[in-house]
Image (cartoon, rainbow, N blue to C red):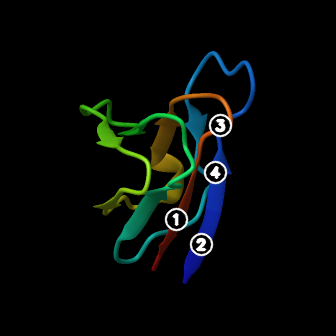
Amino acid sequence: MLSGQLVLPAGALKPAQFPAAPVSESVVVEAYSTNVASVFLGTSQGAQPFEIQPGGNVTVEPDNLDELWLTGTTGDAVCYFGK
């Protein structure tokens, strides 16, 4: 089981990368309902990012968590969990 959170840092000029961790099934990425705006979840393959509105979530199936990137407003955050 893997879980954690990712907070967008102040002054970030590029997307924040998730930490390296193997994924055997899928990962749910959920935006905190207190976020001020949508966050965008992208992959290292450069596919169109997923928009996640505050309180919303998306399920993805990367081989490794570090294939995922997050962009959005400074201080906004997501939590993630999966196998």
Residue indicated by mark 4: 6
Instruction: Provide residue 65's location: percent of width, then percent of height.
Output: 50, 57
In the image, taking residue 43 as reference, residue 65 lies left or right, namely: right
Mark 2 belongs to which amino acid? Ser
Front-lying residue, 36 or 39: 36
Tags 4 and 3 in contact by the CB under 8 Å rule? yes
Q: Secondary structure at mark 3?
A: loop
Q: Which residue is mark 3?
A: 8
Number of callouts in the render? Answer: 4
Quadrant of the snapshot with the N terminus: bottom right
- At label 3, the amino acid type is Leu
Does dot 4 land on a helix, a strand or a loop? strand
Asked which quadrant contains residue 30, the reply is bottom left
Q: Are marks 4 and 2 in contact (CB under 8 Å)?
A: no
Please give the residue where the numbered disc 2 appears in the rendered image.
Answer: 3
Q: Secondary structure at mark 2?
A: strand
